[in-house]
Image (cartoon, helix red, strand yellow):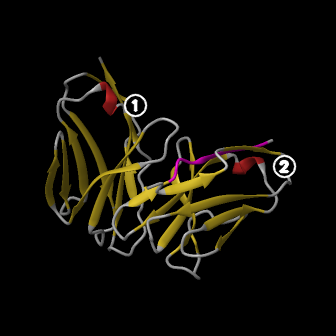
C-alpha cells in the first residue's frame, strides 16, 4: 500500500520556467490537498479538491493552478516559477478524519 | 489573531522526561483535533485525534482538549530520542472541513 506518492522528490527551476508536480493516492480518498511548507510559516494550503471534478483555492493560490485528473490524481502546476515559490510542497488526501501526506517535493527556483 | 497558535520552540528535554506540547485556537466551532508528527525531511504523519473535549490515550501519548479555554495539549510520557520531531496541532470544524495547522513545535529528546 503506497499511500500518497509525489513526483519528483527534488527539482531546481530557473525563474520563469514551468513545471507540474504530480500526486497520486491509492486509498480511494475523495479529498486531496496541496500544501507548501516554509520555515517559520508552517503548512499553508494552496488548493484543494473535495471530490473528483471540483477544486477550490486555499490560503495561498496565487501563481499556481491545479487539475484533479481523476479520483487518484491531483497535480499542481507552476506556470512561471518565481524565487518566492521555493518551498517544500506536500500533497495529502483524506477519508474525512486524518490526512495522509506524501513525502514532499523540494523545489528551488533560482 | 491566527486561528491556531503554537509555540515553535525548540524544546529540548532529557530522555525519560514528560513532554507537554500545546496549542490555542480561536474558532469555537472546531470539533476534531488532530496531532501530527513530522520527522526532518519527511511528510507529516497522523499521531492521534480527539473529538470534542476530553482526553484520549494511546500508549505513551495523551491528547487533551479543553474547549472552554480553546486549549489543546499533547503529553508524551517516558520520552525517547525517537520522539525528536516537529509536532503540529490541527483542528477542524467538522468531518468534512479542512484542517487548520499550527506552525509546529520542534522537540528534541536528548539521550
The residue under label 1 is B10
Disc 1 to disc 2, C-alpha distance: 34 Å
Residue at the front extreme, as displayed: A1
Residue at 70 percent of width and 51 percent of height: A85
Pick the front one: A84 or B81: B81
Residue B53 visible? The answer is yes
Query: Front-most of A7 and A83?
Result: A7
Compared across the picture, whether B107 is left or right of B40 comes to: left
The reply to whether label 1 and label 2 mark residues of one chain is no
Percent x, y of residue A7: 64, 52
Label 1 secondary element: loop
Mark 2 and mark 1 in contact (Cβ < 8 Å)? no
Q: Does residue A64 appear left or right of residue B68 in this picture?
A: right
Question: Dot 1 surroundings within 10 Å: few (below 14), some, or many (20 or more)?
Answer: few
Split into 4 quadrants, where in the image is the N terminus of chain A?
bottom left
Q: Residue at x 65, y 65 (%)?
A: A75
Determine if residue B1 is in view: no
Task: Please name the predominant secondary structure of the magenta segment in the image.
Answer: strand
Q: The numbered mark 1 sits on a residue in which chain?
A: B
Q: Which residues are magenta?
A: A102-109
Q: Residues within 10 Å of mark 2 (few under 14, many from 20)?
A: some
Instruction: Measuring from the top left, give residue A39's x and y in whole percent.
Output: 56, 41
Task: Give the image location of residue A102, x and y in percent.
Answer: 51, 52
The residue beneath circle 2 is A15
x and y percentages locating residue B60 in the rendered image: 17, 39
Q: Is residue B18 left or right of residue A4?
A: left
Amino acid at each position: 500500500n503506497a499511500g500518497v506518492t509525489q513526483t519528483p522528490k527534488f527539482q531546481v527551476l530557473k525563474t520563469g520556467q514551468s513545471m507540474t508536480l504530480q500526486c497520486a493516492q491509492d486509498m480511494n480518498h475523495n479529498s486531496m490537498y496541496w500544501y507548501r511548507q516554509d520555515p517559520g510559516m508552517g503548512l499553508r494550503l494552496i488548493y484543494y479538491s473535495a471530490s473528483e471534478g471540483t477544486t477550490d483555492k486555499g490560503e495561498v493560490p496565487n501563481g499556481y493552478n491545479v487539475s484533479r485528473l481523476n479520483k487518484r490524481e491531483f497535480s499542481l502546476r507552476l506556470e512561471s516559477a518565481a524565487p518566492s515559490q521555493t518551498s517544500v510542497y506536500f500533497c495529502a488526501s483524506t477519508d474525512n478524519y486524518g490526512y495522509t501526506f506524501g513525502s514532499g517535493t523540494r523545489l528551488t527556483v533560482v | 489573531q491566527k486561528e491556531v497558535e503554537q509555540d515553535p520552540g525548540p524544546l529540548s528535554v532529557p530522555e525519560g522526561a514528560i513532554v507537554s506540547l500545546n496549542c490555542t485556537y480561536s474558532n469555537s466551532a472546531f470539533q476534531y483535533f488532530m496531532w501530527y508528527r513530522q520527522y526532518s525531511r519527511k511528510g507529516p504523519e497522523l499521531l492521534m485525534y480527539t473529538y470534542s473535549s476530553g482526553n484520549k490515550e494511546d500508549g505513551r501519548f495523551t491528547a487533551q482538549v479543553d474547549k472552554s479555554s480553546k486549549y489543546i495539549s499533547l503529553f508524551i510520557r517516558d520520552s525517547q530520542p525517537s520522539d525528536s520531531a516537529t509536532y503540529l496541532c490541527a483542528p477542524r470544524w467538522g468531518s468534512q472541513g479542512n484542517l487548520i495547522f499550527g506552525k509546529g513545535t520542534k522537540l528534541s529528546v536528548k539521550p
